[in-house]
Amino acid sequence: MPSSLCGITVDPALVKAALPGGDSLTSATVKPNGGTVRCNLSVDGKEALSLAHTWWTQGQTTATVAQGYADTDDGTLSDDLRFVHTGKAGVGKTVSSCKVSRQPDQDLYTVVQTRDSGVDDPDAIEKLLIAYTKAVEGSAACR
């Protein structure tokens, strides 16, 4: 289990808890547009988990952004309104100081999504989402 996922350092135990069992793990970085970086993890050749950070227009709420991602419907919203998650996916908002000149009027969000892996664990998704969001906040993505 790697400690760095496409350049973002995350506790391997938190990642493992959101993955199905298997023999091999591979990761691939995908940049589907100018503001999104996605790290897709595959177990035994089958995509199992996706971690992403993506820029959204300023003024959105985490609940609104979550509507753009599968498996976040009726998710649990954190007390500070920064995170929403289910047992299969979650969306987090980075701190307001996370700003870069190339995305001037946008906020950075993180997304964790399982991919038909049979994993449905709200606790594991919440812990991974919060840790991943904090890791992104401390990375080059926020500077």
Image (cartoon, grey):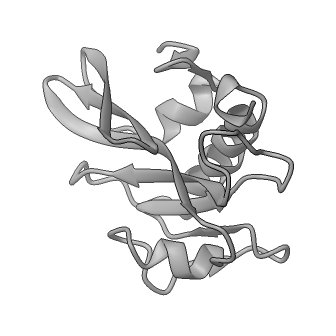
Q: Residue at x 66, y 69 (%)?
A: 58
Give the image location of residue 126, x and y in percent. 63, 57
Query: In screen coordinates, is 43 left or right of 94?
Result: left
- Tell me if residue 21 can be seen: no
Q: Indicate whether 67 appears above or below 97.
A: below
Q: Quadrant of residue 137?
A: top right
Query: In screen coordinates, is 134 left or right of 21?
Result: right
Q: Indicate whether 68 appears above or below 4.
A: below
Q: Residue at x 25, y 29 (%)?
A: 42
Outermost residue on the left side: it is 45
Give the image location of residue 133, x and y in percent. 68, 45
Q: Indicate whether 9 appears above or below 65.
A: above
Give the image location of residue 76, x and y in percent. 62, 78
Outermost residue on the bottom side: it is 74
Q: Quadrant of residue 73?
A: bottom left
Query: Which quadrant is home to the C terminus?
Result: top right
Give the image location of residue 98, x and y in percent. 78, 45
Picture mark count: 0
Q: Residue at x 35, y 51 (%)?
A: 114
